[in-house]
Amino acid sequence: MSWESQIDELTGTGKVTAAAFYGHDGAILATSPGVSVGIPEIKKLVAAFDNDSEATSNGLFLEKTKFLYVSNKDGLLHVRDGTSGAVCVLTKQSLLIGFYQNDEVDNCTEVVKKTGESLRALGN
């Protein structure tokens, strides 16, 4: 399955408003239209999976917007800005970011977690 088809599958659930796949180095693998997370933002997000002290203190930026760091547990990193936010999964080859709005964090988390588990099972 291609990265683009994964994006379509995620957003097609109605539980994820936009999604993106990046390499650990920040290289774009696939994104929903209009999603643009910078390389420095991706690198800090990837680093937060191993050491979240900076993210806890300073938050994280996605698309030049500051998000409050909420949690990093069970392989899922969650950031929030008001009623919107993102749930992220780091796999062997990629970083998946699923965006949500209107406090749909639980629904977004469910879909992003499932996709991450599927990718890991395939060795990604």
Image: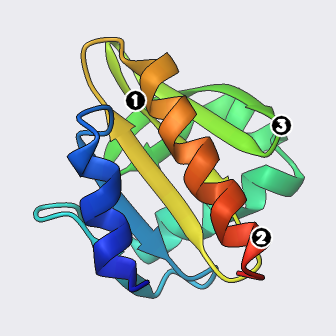
Which residue is label 1 attached to? 85
Residue 27 lies, with reference to residue 114, above or below; the image says: below
Identity of the amino acid at label 2? Ala
Q: Which mark is residue 98?
A: none
Identity of the amino acid at label 3? Asp
Identity of the amino acid at label 1? Gly
Q: Kindly report the distance in space between the C-alpha atoms of the residues bearing marks 2 and 1.
A: 26 Å
Q: Nearer the viewer, mark 2 or mark 1?
A: 2
Tell me residue 97's x, y (percent): 47, 54
Tell me residue 65's x, y (percent): 32, 41
Side of 5 relative to 3 (left or right): left
Q: Residues within 10 Å of mark 1 (few under 14, many from 20)?
A: many
- Whether the residues at callouts 1 and 3 have beta carbons within 8 Å, the answer is no
Q: In which quarter of the image is the N terminus?
A: bottom left
Q: What residue is shown at x 11% (from left), y 65% (from top)?
A: 33
Secondary structure beneath label 3: loop
Q: Residues within 10 Å of mark 2 (few under 14, many from 20)?
A: few
Which residue is label 2 attached to? 121
The residue lying toward the viewer, choosing from 62 and 4, is: 4
Between disc 2 and disc 1, whose residue precedes?
1
Which residue is label 3 attached to? 74
